Amino acid sequence: MSVSSIGTTTAAAYVQQTAATKTEKGTKETSSSKTNQDTAVVYEKGFSSSEKTNSTKSNAAIIAQLKADAEARTSQLQSLVEKMISKQGQTLGTADDMWSFLAKGNLKADPETIAQAKKDVAEDGYWGAEQTSDRILSFAKALSGDDPDKAEELLNAFKKGYSQATKSWGGNLPSLCSDTYDLVEKKFGEWMNSSSQDTQTD
């Protein structure tokens, strides 16, 4: 065999081996790539039982927080109304010089205090029924984020606060307070009706 013949044979064998290696390598890459693509498309992660449990616990915590917020909101309004109505009654008592009778003679008001109290409980005064009912409604709207759907809940809180103020007073509150009560009910009703009218318009 000649030297050139050996060289040709060796060269041919090298070319065949290189081609086989490339083919084998290409097949492996294609197979690997296909496997990766198939895996990405087919595999979908489901919820494990622990994830579902955590989700349920999270929902329960949110519901508990919402209930606590609602209770705090109504409690705030109830407390405000109790203090406000009591103060209104006391101011009226001072204005009419009746507080001394209701407090068994322990409180005597000077003429200037009586004059200021009369001004405060006048129809357009700070403790008059109109302004007091406006403040109660404004506070209720602020607590609810001006949401009329919460109006009934807050009106009930107002009634409880009024009832507590009546007990603290020790008897029926003055007519100014009952006038305020009527105005609050009326204004809450208008607030609730505004929600239903907006719904009908939409």
Image (cartoon, rainbow, N blue to C red):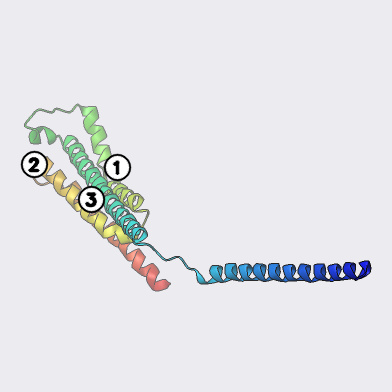
Question: Does residue 193 show up?
Answer: yes
Tell me how far mark 1 sits from mark 3, CA to CA: 13 Å
Q: Is residue 148 left or right of residue 107?
A: right
Q: Earlier in the sequence, mark 2 or mark 3?
A: 2
Label 2 vs label 1, nearer the camera: 2
Q: Alpha-carbon neighbours of circle 1 within 10 Å: few (<14), some, or many (≥20)?
A: some
Q: Which residue is mark 1?
A: 125
Q: Which numbered circle lies on residue 47?
A: none
Residue drawn at the location 38% of the way across and 70% of the way down:
199
Residue drawn at the location 24% of the way across and 28% of the way down:
112
Type of amino acid at the residue the image marks with label 2 = Gly
- The image shows residue 45 at horizontal and vertical percentages of 45, 65
Residue drawn at the location 21% of the way across and 39% of the way down:
87
Q: Are circles 2 and 3 on residues that touch, CB within 8 Å?
A: no
Q: Which numbered circle lies on residue 170?
A: 2
Quadrant including the N terminus: bottom right
- What secondary structure is marked by label 2? loop
Type of amino acid at the residue the image marks with label 1 = Gly
62 lies above or below 164: below
Residue drawn at the location 16% of the way across and 44% of the way down:
165
193 lies above or below 136: below
- What secondary structure is marked by label 3? helix
User: Quadrant of the rendered structure where residue 51 is?
Assistant: bottom left
* Circle count: 3
Tell me how far mark 2 sits from mark 1, CA to CA: 25 Å
Question: Does residue 191 show up?
Answer: no
Q: Earlier in the sequence, mark 2 or mark 1?
A: 1
Q: Are circles 1 and 3 on residues that touch, CB within 8 Å?
A: no
Q: Alpha-carbon neighbours of circle 2 within 10 Å: few (<14), some, or many (≥20)?
A: few
Q: Is residue 201 left or right of residue 64?
A: right
Q: Earlier in the sequence, mark 1 or mark 3?
A: 1
